[in-house]
Image (cartoon, rainbow, N blue to C red):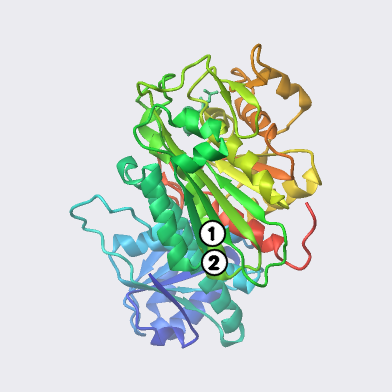
Amino acid sequence: MKVSVTTIPLNELDIDLLLIPVAENVVAESLNALAEQFGEIVQRAGTDFSGAFEETLWLYPEAGRARRLALLGIGAPDRIDLERLRRVAARGAELARERKVVTVAIVRPVVPLDVEATSQALVEGFMLAAYRFTRYKTETELRDIERLVLHETPDDEKASRRGAERGRIIAECVMTARDLVNLSPDEKTPTKLARLMEQSAKKYGYEADVWDKALIEEEGMGGLLAVNRGSTEPPTFTILTWRPENALNERPVILVGKGVVFDTGGLSLKPTKDSMDYMKSDMAGAAAVVGTMEALARLKLPLYVIGLIPATDNRPGENAYVPGEVIRMHSGKTVEVLNTDAEGRLILADALSYARTYRPELVIDLATLTGAQIIALGTEAAAVMTNSIGDPQARLEAIVAAGERSGDRVHPLPMYEEYAKLLESDVADLKNIGGREAGSITAAKFLEHFVDYPWIHVDMAGPAFLKEPKPYRPKGGTGFGVRLLVEFLRDYASPHRRAF
Ligand code: BES
Ligand code: MN
Ligand code: ZN
């Protein structure tokens, strides 16, 4: 989709559909102004429009060059925030699709929010709502929206352009992540996923270094190798690097993404219905890291950032690892595997352990790690946890705030010492499951054994993948994490950045 900004008079816009967001308190004056440009009909039909959030009204103008108008309610002015604007724009995209229009314009409403952020939110909401995954449809009656024009006042044109451009780039990177999650598992074996990452790196100007099984063995990644043993496909470990010359940090920020390309549960096999049938999404953490690396490179963020992607599937093959087996991890620690379905923490632990070699400033991992996260928070937010090194409070505040601003929300869970007890093993240094209680926290406590730096863990099992559509998030992969990380890292790179 092409995105542009214009300041020409509204009635000169030659467009299939003009979207006009209107807040409750300014309905009368907005309709008056519109009537001057599009004819009296606007005012008359407008008696049926109150401006309530999510209300819409179609109008067919008598004057001007726009073929259709649609009023979009934004609701009460004191409740307007960026998320609401994304949803307003998303409604607009739905209307556009209903009528199969090709060109759409949206008026940036005058609201008490930063112009740049407002434009970014409108473009993100619109583009993400217009997304459809059609790769496997031999025929589709859907017509893609080709152009979005943001209507702006001359005074705010520059800021609006910056916001719209950023919104477009970020939305496209979210779509990269969605596409990867929605891809059929046979098209994203560890090797194929690594190829896709190499292609992304090449296209957008960052580095990708792919380790094969021999290198993974040499490095001693016992967790990744154990999970992979039941598979006929070898694992990969991919290192993505964005290091611009003007990077503000010497030591990197590292992003780790769980890349279980399909999780059958292994010998601790999952049931099919409502469980294994969604497990192509178990690499959503990896997808979020790839989308984020693309965004960093495209936005030229002045930060040195590394992405680490351990990738394998988890299957009950003849040689598969078994419950009761003790494995030696990359860090040297031993783990008693009591459930082969708790595989994510094993491959993440090796990546987190390897991350120590960079002496990172901060490490953030993203993973569809536990069903317990979905029980706790559903699909509305991911769970976020952190260790006690450095300034955990500042880290949590920053990531929660980035979640609120970006719409990829995260909510904290505690990391009390007591939870670590649940992972004590009779035979090894620790076991890979903690029991039914506090499943997301014990998973994080497991990972904590493998880090010695400031660390944030995001368990996104719920929000990564939807069975029912939500505003601007269709069924399937949501691309969760890209907007969260980009917002967090943009803030991290800003002059007022704090040490974490
Ligand atoms: N990939 C799953 C977690 C998951 C479940 C993600 C549902 C998305 C939707 C993970 O590997 C897993 O199987 N976790 C187990 C851990 C348990 C065996 C300790 C779980 O949560 O049931
Ligand atoms: Mn599993
Ligand atoms: Zn898994």
- Which element is circle 1 on? helix
Whether residue 47 is visible here, answered yes or no, is: no
Outermost residue on the left side: it is 139
Judge whether 407 appears above or below 6 on screen: above
The residue carrying mark 1 is 293
Rendered image quadrant of residue 373: top right
Which residue is more in the foreground, 30 or 428? Answer: 428
Labels in figure, total: 2
Which residue is more in the foreground, 83 or 358? Answer: 358
Rendered image quadrant of residue 334: top right
Residue that appears at 35% across and 24% down: 317
The residue carrying mark 2 is 297
Few, some or many residues within 10 Å of mark 2 (<14, 14–19, 20+): many
Tell me which amino acid carries mark 2: Ala
Question: In this image, 227 relative to 386: left or right?
Answer: left
Residue that appears at 53% across and 39% down: 218
Residue that appears at 35% across and 25% down: 272
Residue 362 location, x and y as percent? 70, 50
User: Label 1 CB, ligand 3: below 8 Å?
Assistant: no
- Which element is circle 2 on? helix
Tell me which amino acid carries mark 1: Met
Question: In this image, 281 relative to 393: left or right?
Answer: left
Which quarter of the rendering shows the N terminus? bottom left
Are the residues at dot 2 and dot 1 in contact (C-beta closer than 8 Å)? yes
Residue that appears at 64% across and 47% down: 364
